[in-house]
Image (tube, helix red, strand yellow):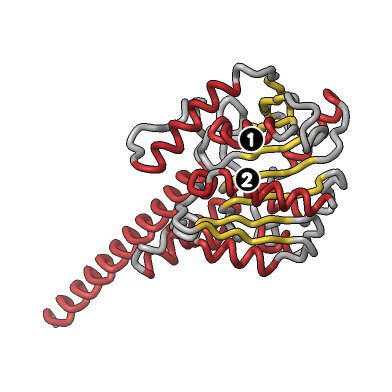
């Protein structure tokens, strides 16, 4: 009798211990899942200068070049625009054309920045476009100060902000002869998500996407590929739960890979062959899925994430502008 009671008590203790361990593990993976969600969507609270702290090698040189180009860019005529979009205040810089007789005079380039980045990181690109005759619109995406928004959208739900900025430009400056949408990293995901959008205006003649992800879910899986399989799978399931709950995402939302499959606009995909942040394979997959009759894939030897422009230099722009000219012909 005593041994039976002892065994019963021992079994209960074991079950309680197992339940406690299971609860602890569940809490652990939930916390990891929420941390991943917060890491991906937490807004930038300050419009910080371009980050050179801790950067080395080519990345440091790229950032220093962008800082210098930003300083020069701000000496040119420009305006800071404000717009209200679903109770959120958004900002953008507009730079009117400075070379009215250049080859692309009359057109506007919309430059879309990357994740947790400042829009002036695209200052080198803005200067090239201005020198070629474009006017330049540089939106500051929601979730990135000084624009409002509690969280970063990651290029999914609020891609329509770009279309609203284009409409504001038409109202403020008159319609340009055409638009070129140029996105980098998460900005590339934004413009790729517009590529197959039925609301894409007909005056968008070209989309250029550098190192954009093919799928937000697959990009998330890539980012946590180093975790232990069980922890990775369970924590990511909770990450998706938080995305669906707090961001209103669904699995049927637009993703770049699905949108390019409906694209009719000429589309150029650019990706560095040494990109370990957004894997090169995603760029190749986007190109293969793209339904546009005019498409091009540029893979850049030796380029890490968002480094193709810096690595290729003038050749980067030669390829881009050649594609634009071909699309317009």
Residue ID at (54%, 27%): 69
Q: Is residue 61 above or below residue 319?
A: above
The quarter of the picture where the N terminus appears is: bottom left
Q: Quadrant of residue 92?
A: top right
* Residue to which mark 1 is pinned: 128
Residue contact at pointers 2 and 1, CB within 8 angstroms: yes
153 or 321, which is in the foreground?
A: 321
Q: Residue at x 62, y 28 (%)?
A: 147
Q: Nearer the viewer, residue 36 or 22?
A: 36
Nearer the observer, 82 or 246: 82
Evaluate whether residue 247 shows in this view: no
Residue 248 image offset from top left, x and y in percent: 65, 49
Provide the secondary structure element on which disc 2 rests. Answer: helix
Judge whether 113 appears above or below 190 on screen: above
Residue at mark 2: 317
> With respect to residue 60, does 297 lie above or below?
below
Determine if residue 327 is in view: yes
Q: Quadrant of residue 86?
A: top right
- Left or right side of 30 for 113: right
> Local crowd at mark 2 within 10 Å, few (<14), some, or many (≥20)?
some
Q: Earlier in the sequence, mark 2 or mark 1?
A: 1
**Displayed quadrant of residue 119:** top right
Q: Residue 208, how many percent across, how many down?
A: 68, 50
Secondary structure at badge 1 equals helix
Taking the spot 69% from the left edge, 17% from the top edge, the residue there is 77
């Amino acid at each position: 009798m005593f041994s039976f009671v002892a065994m019963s008590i021992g079994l209960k203790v074991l079950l309680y211990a197992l339940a406690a361990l299971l609860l602890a593990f569940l809490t652990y993976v939930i916390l990891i899942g929420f941390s991943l969600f917060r890491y991906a969507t937490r807004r930038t609270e300050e419009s910080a200068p371009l980050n050179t702290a801790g950067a080395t090698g080519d990345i440091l040189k790229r950032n220093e070049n962008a800082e210098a180009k930003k300083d020069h860019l701000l000496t040119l005529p420009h305006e800071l625009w404000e717009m209200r979009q679903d109770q959120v205040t958004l900002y953008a810089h507009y730079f009117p054309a400075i070379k009215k007789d250049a080859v692309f005079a009359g057109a506007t380039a919309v430059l879309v920045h990357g994740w947790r980045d400042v829009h002036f990181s695209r200052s080198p690109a803005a200067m090239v476009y201005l020198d070629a005759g474009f006017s330049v619109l540089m939106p500051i995406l929601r979730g990135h100060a000084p624009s409002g928004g509690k969280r970063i959208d990651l290029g999914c739900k609020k891609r329509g902000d770009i279309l609203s900025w284009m409409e504001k430009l038409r109202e403020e400056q008159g319609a340009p002869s055409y638009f070129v949408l140029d996105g980098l990293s998460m900005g590339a995901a934004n413009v790729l998500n517009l590529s197959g959008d039925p609301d894409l205006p007909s005056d968008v003649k070209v989309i250029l996407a550098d190192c954009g992800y093919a799928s937000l879910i697959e990009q998330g899986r890539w980012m946590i590929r180093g975790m232990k399989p069980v922890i990775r799978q369970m924590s990511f399931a909770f990450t998706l739960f938080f995305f669906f709950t707090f961001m209103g995402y669904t699995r049927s939302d637009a993703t770049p890979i699905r949108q390019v499959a409906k694209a009719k606009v000429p589309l150029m995909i650019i990706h560095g062959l040494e990109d370990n942040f957004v894997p090169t394979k995603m760029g190749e997959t986007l190109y293969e899925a793209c339904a546009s009759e005019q498409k091009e894939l540029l893979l850049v030897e030796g380029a890490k994430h968002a480094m193709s422009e810096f690595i290729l230099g003038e050749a980067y722009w030669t390829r881009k502008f050649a594609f634009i000219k071909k699309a317009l012909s």
